[in-house]
Image (cartoon, rainbow, N blue to C red):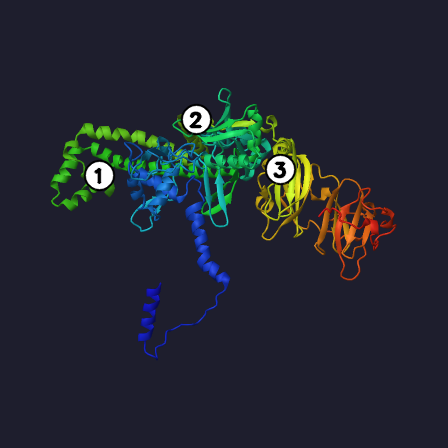
Amino acid sequence: MAKKTKRTTEVIDKLPDNTHIAGAGLVESQRITDTLETNYMPYVMTVILSRAIPEIDGFKPSHRKLLYTMYKMGLLTGARTKSANIVGATMKLNPHGDAAIYETMVRLSRGYQALLHPYVDSKGNFGRAYSSDMEYAASRYTEAKLDPIAAELFRDIDRDTVDFIDNYDSTMKEPTLLPVSFPSILVNNNVGIAVGMASSICSFNLQEVCDTAIALMKDPEHDISDTLKAPDFPGGGLIVYRREEMEKIYSTGRGGVRVRSVYSYDKAANCIDITQIPPTTTVEAIIKKMTELVKNGKVREISDVRNEIGLNGLKITIDLKRGVDPDRLMNKLFAMTPLEDTFSCNFNILIVGVPRVMGVREILEEWTAFRMECVRRRVYFDLSRAKDKLHLLQGLSKILLDIDKAIRIIRSTDEESEVVPNLMIGFGIDEIQAEYVAEIRLRHLNREYILKRTEEIGKLESDIREMEEILGSAARVRGIIVDELREISKKYGQPRRSQLLYASEMTEFSEEEKEEVPDYPCTFFFTAEGYFKKITPQSLRMSGEQKLKERDRIIQTVESSNAKDLLFFTAQGTVYKAKASDFPDTKASVMGDYVAGKLGFEEGETAFHMVVTADYSGMLVFFFENGKAAKVELSAYATKTNRRRLVGAYSDKSPVVAIVHITEDTEFLLTSTSGRRLLMHTGAVSIKTTRNTQGVQVMTLKGSHRLERVELFEEGMVAKPNRYRTKTLPAAGAMPSAEDVGEQLTLT
């Protein structure tokens, strides 16, 4: 950067003083809408049309270019070739780099296991779709060819079934679509993200798709659910089947398919083996989530989790603790980990260059229309060839009448250029027929050869009539497609990999079960510096002195149990919610957990009070320095969504002096900085519905005095309680009598 600046300075210094640079220093304004139209919109259209959204043949341009290149390389038959050769050849059609092309081939390969019916027969390490850690080998090490089913993608492609266009440098031709003879758009999953839109098409069983396409061609009102049960994913899994949700996907092209992992329990080893997972996740993501749950104490039944992917395929092993119910644990893991996940469907497909979100019926109708056009073009191509051949043979048949005459005409013609015109005149044939006759070899000018060739005339005429009838009948064209679909279904069909699990038969894991934790007695300690300890009675009996941070002290000690909820109030008016089970059991000899760090407090927030509850019953009473008190039901802090942080936990108009959790109204002794005391009953304060209420005035304060201390009243705390009681609030209270002067314990 320094060299560039120096060089630029030198160039400017050499310019004459009177030199002016046109446009230098000018700022040109431009409408943002014009910028979007001229710069951004072309990019958007390119991404949508040429990259991310598949077309009716089931392929994006990158897929189509790769497969067509392999087809032209002769890889439909014969031996495999190095992947690097394929990548290099594909670059003649695909302007992207070799890495992008190779990654496309990997995803289409049998080794990667991402497709129900892979189009690339691979050899070598192509990674695995279900593992993010298994990287594919470099293209120079792997080999590939086209899988046999790829023949159905190119059926009759050389018979003018689809249009061809120039490649990016106009040196080759490539097809705009592949003439796929089965609905590949639904057979293999396809996901793409464009600009402002996306496409997510799940895979279906080949036999079911073919049967459904056939049924719709015979009866447009056919109920799709009768033949197309549900999606079928390459990795298997259990599809949680709800007919109404599936019909919504079939009709609108949008919705979600819930997929559960498949597992088995090994009683001898006391472990669970997971062998099939949803297509939207990976083994590593599942193990990471389970590890987090174990570390946070939310799942206590697991002793170890291992990735055991091997030659036999996917396998996750979960070692269980003694006495654990495996089915109950799996229900919990289904609810809390990606072992059950949802495949979001968005059947967005390019139809004649326009993106459309369609249901299964519309997709199959569009594919049928596309395939009918391919078949018509194929038949028309064959018809044209047959008519051309018939025309030639009809000219040849006239030679049969007098072969000697044809020889005499040719021998008597002086110039070669006059041979064709003389044959045309002599036999009454056109120029094309005469050229054909003139090119016949001398050895073929015999009656046997000519009779054999002219015998084809009858068959050609019959074939031509047949093809003309096909072109004139949509039903005949559909019949051809139906026969092809039946042939493909029989040849390449395979049993379903994803089985159905009917929602009515499965046990949903409730929220209560999800949060269930072991319940046992323990004592909670909360310090002024914001440290928390949870100690069991046995450990507490064996403990010595509590270890604390220097100048720290314990301000709350609560005997409770592990299944309780904890509310930590901060000086900034917020409350953080946690479960006692979130904190590990500890000992008096350790400092404990720093609550602000454990619960992720905002910067500058510090906790000063803890409330322990199980059912959020009772009330919280807030006492403020300005002499006001607020009473709020604890249930106001219970949330259905289990939010961790609640703002506006109490009023911030005046600093809070004390927060007290009570189950019934009782008396408190209030002391101000002036020394006055007031004995008040919380029944005189009405309950407020809002958490951040300012409360009501209970103690009258004069000048700069403020409420200093709040104590839960107990008999014997003062010699004459009636001295400090009052019939009405607010009240100023009374100065302490001589016998009441002395230190007293506080709640703060």
Mark 3 or mark 1: which comes first in sequence? 1
Q: Which mark is residue 436?
A: 1
Residue 334 in the image: above or below residue 7: above
In the foreground, 719 or 488:
719
Name the front one of labels 3 and 2. 3
- The residue at which mark 3 appears reads as 534
Residue 539 in the image: above or below residue 528: above
Q: Is residue 161 visible?
A: no
Residue 27 in the image: above or below residue 704: below
The answer to whether residue 630 is left or right of residue 516 is: right
View extreme (bottom): residue: 18
* Residue type for callout 3: Lys
- Residue drawn at x 41%, y 37% is 133
Q: Which mark is residue 494?
A: 2
**Element under label 3?**
strand
- Residue drawn at x 34%, y 79% is 17
Q: Are marks 3 and 1 in contact (CB under 8 Å)?
A: no
**Element under label 1?**
helix
Residue 80 in the image: above or below residue 167: above
**Residue 160 % position (x, y):** 35, 40
**Residue 218 % position (x, y):** 50, 30
**Element under label 2?**
loop
View extreme (top): residue: 268
